[in-house]
Image (tube, helix red, strand yellow):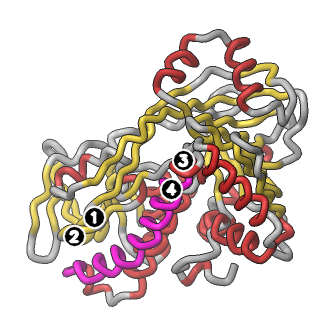
Amino acid sequence: MTSTEIAVVGGGLVGLTAALLLSDAGFSVVIIDPVTALPVRDDPYDLRTYALTSTSRQIFSNLGVWSALDHGRIAPFSDMQVWDGARGGELTFPADLIPGTLALGYIVEHSNLLNAVQQVVQAQSRISGLGGQVTAITEGRESSTIHLGGRELRAKLILGCDGGDSPLRRLCGIACVEHDYAQHAVVANVTTVIEHANVARQRFLAEGPLAFLPLPPADLSSVVWTMSAEYAAWVQRCSDDEFCAALSAAFENRLGAVTATSRRLIFPLRRRHAADYSRGRVALLGDAAHVIHPLAGQGLNLGLRDAVTIAELVGAAPRASLNHPQTLLRRYARTRRGENLAMLLLTDQLNRIFAVRAPWFTWLRHTGLVGLNHLQGIKAELVAHAMGRRGELPPSVRDL
């Protein structure tokens, strides 16, 4: 049997980031993950991308991850446009709403980000890895034993970062509230006649939002199109030309015609929220604790805030507190649950509000959007929230 202070179950972005943060704080960390293969990059750009906030960029900068990225493959966006597909009420969010802001966010490919994080992790002497799946956890007096199908690891603290279907969450008996949105997301990279000018755009349709996010080539965008299961089935079997024509029409030709598309990924959308963020010596982070609608692009950003929060709570406590970390984990749960729940409910309500097509409600929604677009102070607050500059910020990113 081997021992460590902290075990991180799950080698994705949130788990690796948590491991780096805790290693920097002086703790020994073992990452448990059954997947050892390096991420595969799609050609020419990944279909899986993230919209990172400035707070998330700061987290990665502090860890040395940002400098390890391939910056030629990152697309900063300086403006956002959001409009109603029913009556055309529109909101615009330029970066200069907040003085000194050059970018509202950054579109980064999964493979680019994961490769950079893994590169930094591999240079840390306090971090090691174990392949395998957790099959059981035996609680001890001052540590727990993690069973890995023939191997065992003793740890004082266990972080569950193993995704929305989290086997560790189920193993701990933590309930999860789920809601099926009855929507599917179609993801593709598309070429358009008009250049995107580094603007993130989103049109709200009755079936769900349609987002065009800029990629480094001026005419290439990452598309996330939310729709019904029936329409998604058609999208799955239609030709590229048919898809491009339908997408151009759904986006009102804001970027002219869509002239080419990559392969398409389609997946169902569900909301998940763990009833508890901790149990015993186990804390849940990222998608293991919360899965939200992708319309705001905040999933990874929330997970990174989870990682920073627990690392700073553990790092600031006496080392002996790891022998009995339940109080620390309750503080973590109190700190993060409120913010995550607020974002979950916000995305839920936006998805519902823009789905209503009653004439009186579409008029009311249009009037509200037009009026809000002239309220610069409120828009600046909305931008600050979208950039991750509001809420209960961890100390390491409060100076943004």
The earlier-in-sequence mark between 2 and 3 is 2
Q: Amino acid at mark 4?
A: Gln
Q: Amino acid at mark 3?
A: Pro
- CB atoms of marks 1 and 2 within 8 Å: yes
Q: Would residue 366 be seen by someone viewing this image from the given angle?
A: yes
Vertical order, 229 against 16 (above or below): above
Determine which residue is flagged by label 3: 294
Mark 3 and mark 4: Cα distance apart in space? 13 Å
Which circle, 1 or 4, is nearer the viewer? 4
The picture places residue 368, in percent across and down from the top left corner, at: 70, 61
Mark 2 and mark 4: Cα distance apart in space? 34 Å
Vertical order, 368 against 32 (above or below): below
Mark 2 and mark 3: Cα distance apart in space? 30 Å
Determine which residue is flagged by label 4: 349
Q: Amino acid at mark 2?
A: Arg
Disc number for residue 281: 2
Vertical order, 391 against 161 (above or below): below
The earlier-in-sequence mark between 3 and 1 is 1
10 Å crowding of disc 3: few (<14), some (14-19), many (20+): some
Mark 1 and mark 2: Cα distance apart in space? 6 Å
Determine which residue is flagged by label 1: 158
* Residue 35 is one of the magenta-drawn residues: no
**In front here: 71 or 167?**
167
**In front here: 212 or 281?**
212
